[in-house]
Amino acid sequence: MTADTGDRAGQQYWNAVWSAATQTDRMAPSTPGFRNHVDRGFAALFRTLVPGREFELLEVGCASSRWLPYFASEYGARVCGLDYSELGCDVERTILRDAGIEGEIVCGDLFAPPTILTNRFDVVLSFGVVEHFDDTTAVIRALREYVKPGGTLVTVIPNMVGAIGTIERWINRPVYDLHVPLAPRELAGAHADAGMTVTAAQYFLSTHFGVLNTNGLDPQARATRAKLSLCVNLGRLSKAVWSVEARVRPLKATRMFAPYVVVTAHR
């Protein structure tokens, strides 16, 4: 990864994450219940974004992704993934193989794209990638190179400017420091500066405290037990909100409580 982009996480961090990864569940947005509430939200969003069926999709930062098999099975998309963690790539190859999905997984630097991947994809998708780099515009500019003219770039990051960021900073400061907090306007501005035409920039979903990250906390520390207990109770709060939404209507996503920021843009 090129040094001047300021990669806050790095391959060593991600290799440690993927070495500890457990089995990834399949996407199940059509299945009722709290477990699939977030899946349903994203599935509804993507139905408004993807270009019909049998398009070509690249996920950058694809390690342990549930989305590549979903898009392949749901839309008949030809799927490809890119990640700079070889271990993460192996995890994703296993996920695709177990799902019976043919897909291309490339281990490489997103800032030095193989020519076979440039100007190629109808949809380029990233979950939780761009916020780990100090130079947000440089990352978006790099992602743009994979999008074919007229194609769509979808960028999803955790909302670190609201309550989730505040809580993450308290429970796990080292993980919080791996992120650049970005509001929709700032993330959209980076897309525009990178030469993309922004079509939407939004906070997404009403709540999901399950995005809080406790990786690396000392399991023997009393403070860790308190922090884990807080995360469990916040997760229950999210489920209570989802229960209300299921009975009444979805609540508005807000800066304070939305778990994600999503920007969509065209090349």
Image (cartoon, helix red, strand yellow):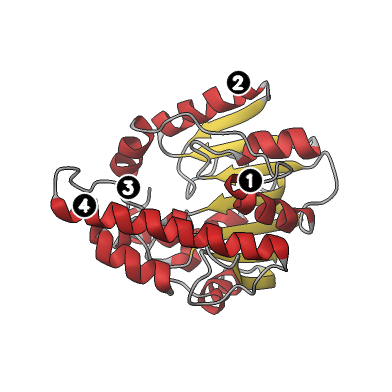
Numbered label attached to residue 97: 2
The residue beneath circle 4 is 224
Distance CA(mark 2)–CA(mark 3):
27 Å
Picture coordinates of residue 86 (x, y %)?
Answer: 41, 30
Q: Earlier in the sequence, mark 3 or mark 4?
A: 3
Q: Earlier in the sequence, mark 2 or mark 1?
A: 2
Picture coordinates of residue 56 (x, y %)?
Answer: 74, 41
Question: Looking at the picture, does residue 266 appear above or below residue 10?
Answer: below
The residue type indicated by label 3 comes to Gly
Tags 4 and 2 touching, CB below 8 Å: no
Distance CA(mark 4)–CA(mark 2):
37 Å
Question: Looking at the picture, does residue 247 appear above or below residue 84?
Answer: below
Question: 13 or 252: nearer the eye?
Answer: 252
Q: Nearer the viewer, mark 2 or mark 1?
A: 2
The residue beneath circle 3 is 10
Residue beneath the point at 68% across and 24% down: 102
Q: Nearer the viewer, mark 2 or mark 3?
A: 2
The residue type indicated by label 2 comes to Arg
The residue beneath circle 1 is 118
